[in-house]
């Protein structure tokens, strides 16, 4: 608009629809912040709210002025579009679902999580501000620089250090100290990831942008705010969505304190940030899980941004353990809890790196395969960790790709490196004997081994190395035998009994927990051949092929009955208690630890259920609510249900009685629902004596539920169950449907 056509603002222009005075010409990819600020400044308004003629009570947050859905913004846009013939949809943002704090921001067709939207302040590029504009990329926090001019964005005035405002006065100078923003320093940057993301945005690729920013939003929660602002996380997100993993470990490892660092820990936040539909990214990350490095405090821009704490799920993923095991490690002092006021509980990073260092120092790199006496590390992780810390065990070489599940441990206590007092504890004795501590306590009680005296002369439960060696040469537990033949411990007793070898201590001898055998009784036995022959009797193990267990025409096992009805063991017990099915013991199966059922009673009960109706289907067919059915018919003992656990049935005979009752009477709530009458309409008719309520003399169900007679209603509005209307709507009579 020419200068002579401009009119100064007056009182009338602030009322009703505002006249366009000085029209700002939108620039390419210009933020609505600078567009509205230039408009208010050129027309001498003190702020954007007055320029758009928005009442203070309707203004709300600053973000409302940046979306094209606000009424006053639409008026402003209409004036600009009618004068300049432009489409302001490219300048104003949209929202996915209304003006709420959670709604994503729509930018060029892409959904940007609201957490990334910077609405309350302005971020200025020194080059853009010389043209009096703010680029749209500056409105989103994942851009740390201007992707157009490759210079750093300024968020605060360099003179007074206060945040830069956009909705009050001019954006050309600071509102607090009048510093001219065209003098902002141009700090060159190199952010290829930001340039790539802007190219995706300009190309209108919403699927790729939305998925990348969704991943970035989840990833941001694992790092400090300064790490996100540095642009490292955006670089990682963009590279992964381009299928590039080069130097990924190196760029993220600088964020951790010095110490032994595993790739699995570095990759943990990326793996956990992958949501639904990100299997391709997980596939890219899996080859990177293997390996570790000694992280030193190398000089670099990010060396001060070390992760001091880790989220619980990061630690569990890094070690490949459960939450329960992580809590045990914390209680044992291997990991350290950190919880600031008002924040979630986390794990100190240094404590986890110390755990890695402890395991790394216990490696035996010369072990090529898992020989005898090597065991998995993870099943008994806490106790194994104690052994490593005390220097009593070593582990195989590993790459941490599977966490703690990827390596084996060998106890060194067999060398009897006794502690300072020269004695071994019960736990240490049990490790040597390959059994439980309680089993050692039992053999002590049985007098098979005696604890040695402590140095102070008092009796105690400690043993000398000589005592332990002597015991292990004379005796062995069934667990050790089972491990040697790779069989279950429960079957070893039956195998040895078939060869005439009985324990000297055990559950059937003296009530001990684990059977104990003399090594002299085992000399000359070929245990492997005994296992292959399977010529033994016992409850454990698979029965010989062709063995007749019971008469299947008379009996059914618990497994068969459960599969037939779909019942769990508790529901089966309920059916037995109620007398629906009968249990018994087949001949010769008295010692079996399971139930057997008479097939005849099971099939009879099955047939009864098949001819019955499920309660959930019954009240639906009757057209009444579940509450009415139970109050009216079950609570009144009008019918008796078959109830097994969560399942309920009603027999066909009882259902016919219920159906006949529903054909004569109807509940007031059901009548209201079917006729569309106002709330409590029929109750009011009863209270005013215009219709009479059904008494308990007519039907026992009336004593438990408010009922009225169906003849008191319009039969065309409410049909009784089992009835159908005649073709002539004026007729009042209906005939039952033949069943």
Image (tube, grey):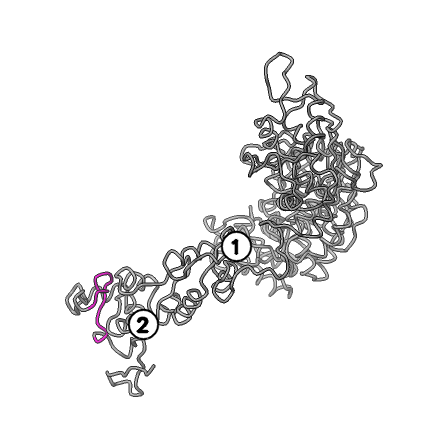
Name the residue located 36 percent from the left edge and 58 percent from the top edge: 578
Near-viewer residue (448 or 59): 448
Question: Residue 361 in the image: x percent, y percent?
Answer: 78, 31
Give left or right: position of 140 versus 650.
right
Near-viewer residue (264 or 182): 264
Q: Quadrant of residue 174?
A: top right
Give left or right: position of 624 versus 300.
left
User: Residue under circle 1?
Assistant: 99
Give the structural element (helix, strand or loop) at label 2: helix
Give the structural element (helix, strand or loop) at label 1: loop
Question: Residue 610 in the image: x percent, y percent?
Answer: 42, 70
Question: Residue 28 in the image: x percent, y percent?
Answer: 70, 58
The tag earlier along the polypeptide, 2 or 1, is 1
Question: Residue 293 in the image: x percent, y percent?
Answer: 80, 37
Figure check: 167 above or below 509: below
Q: Residues within 10 Å of mark 2 (few under 14, many from 20)?
A: few
Please state the extent of the stretch shown in magenta in the rendering. 699-711
Give left or right: position of 523 versus 622.
right
Quadrant in which the N terminus is drawn: bottom right
Tell us which disc is closer to us: 2 or 1. Answer: 2
Q: Quadrant of residue 483?
A: top right
Near-viewer residue (192 or 79): 192
Figure check: 459 above or below 589: above
Q: How many angstroms separate mark 2 from mark 1 (CA)? A: 59 Å
Queried whether the magenta region covers residue 709, the answer comes back as yes
Q: Residues within 10 Å of mark 1 (few under 14, many from 20)?
A: some
Quadrant in which the C terminus is drawn: bottom left
Q: Is residue 464 visible?
A: yes
* Residue farthest along the right direction in this orientation: 366
User: Residue under circle 2?
Assistant: 653
Q: Is residue 159 visible?
A: no
Queried whether the magenta region covers residue 268, the answer comes back as no
């Amino acid at each position: 608009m020419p200068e002579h056509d401009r009119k100064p603002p007056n009182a009338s222009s602030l009322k009703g629809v505002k006249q366009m005075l000085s029209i700002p010409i939108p620039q390419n990819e210009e933020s609505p912040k600078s567009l509205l600020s230039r408009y208010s400044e050129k027309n001498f308004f003190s702020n954007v709210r007055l320029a758009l003629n928005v009442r203070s009570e309707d203004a709300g947050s600053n973000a409302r002025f940046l979306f094209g859905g606000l009424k006053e913004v639409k008026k402003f846009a209409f004036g600009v579009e009618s004068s300049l013939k432009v489409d302001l949809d490219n300048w104003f943002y949209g929202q996915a679902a209304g003006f709420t704090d959670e709604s994503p921001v729509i930018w060029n067709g892409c959904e940007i999580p609201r957490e990334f939207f910077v609405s309350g302040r302005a971020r200025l590029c020194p080059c853009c501000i010389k043209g009096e504009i703010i680029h749209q990329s500056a409105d989103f926090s994942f851009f740390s620089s201007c992707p157009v001019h490759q210079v750093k964005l300024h968020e605060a005035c360099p003179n007074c250090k206060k945040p830069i405002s956009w909705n009050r006065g001019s954006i050309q100078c600071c509102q607090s100290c009048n510093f001219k923003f065209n003098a902002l320093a141009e700090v060159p940057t190199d952010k290829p990831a930001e340039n790539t993301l802007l190219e995706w945005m300009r190309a209108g690729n919403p699927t790729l942008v939305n998925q990348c920013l969704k991943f970035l939003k989840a990833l941001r929660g694992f790092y400090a705010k300064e790490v996100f602002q540095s642009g490292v996380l955006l670089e990682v997100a963009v590279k992964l969505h381009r299928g590039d993993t080069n130097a990924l470990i190196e760029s993220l490892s600088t964020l951790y304190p010095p110490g032994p660092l595993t790739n699995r820990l570095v990759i943990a936040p990326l793996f956990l940030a992958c949501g639904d539909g990100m299997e391709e990214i997980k596939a890219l990350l899996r080859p990177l899980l293997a390996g570790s490095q000694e992280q030193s405090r190398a000089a670099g821009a990010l060396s001060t941004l070390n992760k001091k704490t880790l989220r619980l799920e990061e630690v569990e993923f890094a070690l490949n353990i459960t939450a329960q095991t992580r809590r045990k490690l914390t209680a044992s002092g291997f990991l350290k809890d950190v919880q600031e006021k008002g924040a979630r509980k986390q794990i100190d990073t240094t404590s986890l790196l110390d755990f890695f260092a402890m395991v790394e120092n216990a490696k035996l790199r010369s072990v090529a395969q898992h020989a005898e006496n090597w065991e998995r590390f993870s099943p008994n992780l806490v106790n194994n960790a104690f052994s490593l810390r005390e220097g009593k065990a070593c582990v195989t070489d590993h790459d941490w790709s599977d966490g703690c599940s990827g390596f084996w441990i060998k106890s060194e206590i067999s060398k009897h490196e006794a502690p300072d007092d020269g004695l071994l504890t019960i736990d240490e004795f049990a490790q040597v004997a390959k059994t439980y501590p309680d089993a050692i306590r039992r053999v002590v009680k049985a007098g098979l081994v005696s604890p040695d005296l402590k140095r102070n002369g008092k009796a105690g439960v400690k043993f000398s190395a000589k005592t332990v060696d002597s015991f292990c040469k004379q005796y062995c537990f069934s667990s050790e035998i089972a491990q040697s033949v790779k069989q279950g411990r429960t079957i070893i007793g039956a195998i040895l009994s078939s060869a005439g070898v009985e324990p000297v201590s055990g559950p059937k001898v003296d009530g001990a927990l684990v059977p104990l055998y003399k090594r002299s009784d085992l000399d000359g036995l070929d245990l492997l051949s005994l296992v292959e022959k399977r010529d033994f009797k016992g409850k454990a193990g698979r029965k010989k092929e062709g063995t007749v267990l019971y008469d299947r025409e008379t009996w059914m096992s618990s497994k068969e009955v459960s599969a037939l009805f779909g019942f769990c063991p508790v529901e089966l017990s309920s059916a037995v208690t109620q007398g629906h099915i009968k249990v018994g013991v087949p001949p010769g199966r008295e010692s079996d630890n399971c139930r057997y059922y008479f097939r005849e009673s099971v099939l009879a009960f099955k047939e009864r259920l098949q001819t019955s109706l499920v309660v959930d289907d019954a009240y639906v067919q009757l057209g009444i609510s579940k509450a009415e059915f139970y109050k009216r018919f079950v609570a009144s003992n009008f019918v008796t249900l078959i109830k097994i656990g969560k399942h309920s049935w009603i027999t066909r005979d009882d259902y016919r009685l219920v159906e006949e009752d529903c054909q004569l009477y109807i509940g007031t709530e059901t009548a209201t629902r079917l006729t569309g009458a106002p709330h409590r309409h029929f109750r009011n008719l009863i209270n005013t004596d215009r219709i009479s309520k059904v008494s308990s003399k007519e039907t026992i169900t009336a004593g438990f539920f408010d009922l009225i007679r169906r003849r008191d209603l319009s039969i065309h509005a409410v049909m009784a169950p089992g009835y159908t209307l005649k073709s002539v709507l004026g007729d009042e009579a209906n005939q039952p449907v033949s069943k």
